[in-house]
Amino acid sequence: RYTGRVITIASPKGGVGKTTVSTNLAIGLTASAPQSTVLVDLDVQFGDVASALGLRPEYTLPDAVHGQASQDTMVLKTFLTQHPSGLYAVCGAESPAAGDTVTGEDVSRLLASLAREFRYVVVDTAPGLSPQTLAALDRASDVVMLTSMDVPGVRGLRKELDVLRELCMIPAGRHVVMNFADPRGGLSVRDVELAIGTGVDVVLPRSTTVPTSTNQGVPLIANGRRRDPMVQELRRLVSRFAATPLKSPRGRARHRAAS
């Protein structure tokens, strides 16, 4: 058994494209690791991974963390929803109230179980630093920090990075992705890098194809438009993971003590 890579997608604010990035990354990784990629919808109140992938799940996140599924990995696997691509998904709760029954400890246990069974565990989180998101960051071998290319988004990311540094919760695999890049917005990539104090790894252009893709439940990376600049950049993000070997996870005690 290997310990798979837990890739947590996080952002301080909503509306910056976390689910778009998560679903496309997961579909892209499935192409390189068929049957070995799972996507977890950890926006416990308003997760929409199922609709972004056109899935109708029989079971959702609360089912996967409570009862027998929390104790037995074979049972847990029967609670996953399968996408036609071969991607597995833990879809979001049907209601905010149901989602609120999922604790940080539940998330930590779920991600540890999935990492023993899957090569890639991609985690879509809610905006901000909820207990569930912190648990996903604590378990992460990689974090994708996402921001929009505007002043409020960049300032929010700077604050979140500062908090995570103080908590010693930025893993070795850190990837900064800027979405909605538009040269007419008045900010350059260099401006953003100076503001957040670190480099930007992938720049996703503002794209007219994303809303249609979301509404149809078909991720851009799966629709065959290889020349679309957004698809090219999403593939670049996928290659950051698909081309690199598995890393051993960080010890939990080490950075718990540091915080």
Image (spheres, helix red, strand yellow):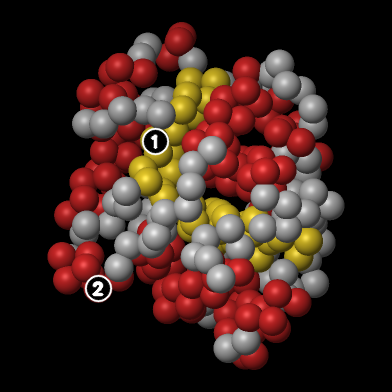
Badge 2 vs badge 1, beta-carbon distance below 8 Å: no
Q: Residue furthest top?
A: 184
- Mark 2 or 1: in front is 2
Q: Is residue 93 left or right of residue 213?
A: left
- Residue 242 vertical position relative to residue 206 in the rendered view, above or below: below
- For the C terminus, the image quarter is bottom left
- Indicate the position of residue 52 as horizontal and vertical percent values: 71, 47
Residue 192: mark in rendering: none
Q: What is the x, y in percent for residue 152?
A: 34, 33
Q: In screen coordinates, is 203 left or right of 209? A: left
Whether residue 180 appears in this view of the structure is no
Looking at numbered disc 1 in the image, what kind of residue is underneath it? Val
- Measured as percent of width and height from the top left, residue 105 is found at 42, 78
Q: In which quadrant will I find the N terminus? A: bottom right
Q: Going by the image, does 48 lie left or right of 171?
A: right
Q: Which residue is mark 1?
A: 176
In the image, what residue occupies the spot 53% across and 80% down?
101
What amino acid type should be assigned to the residue bearing mark 2?
Ala
Provide the residue designation for mark 2.
253
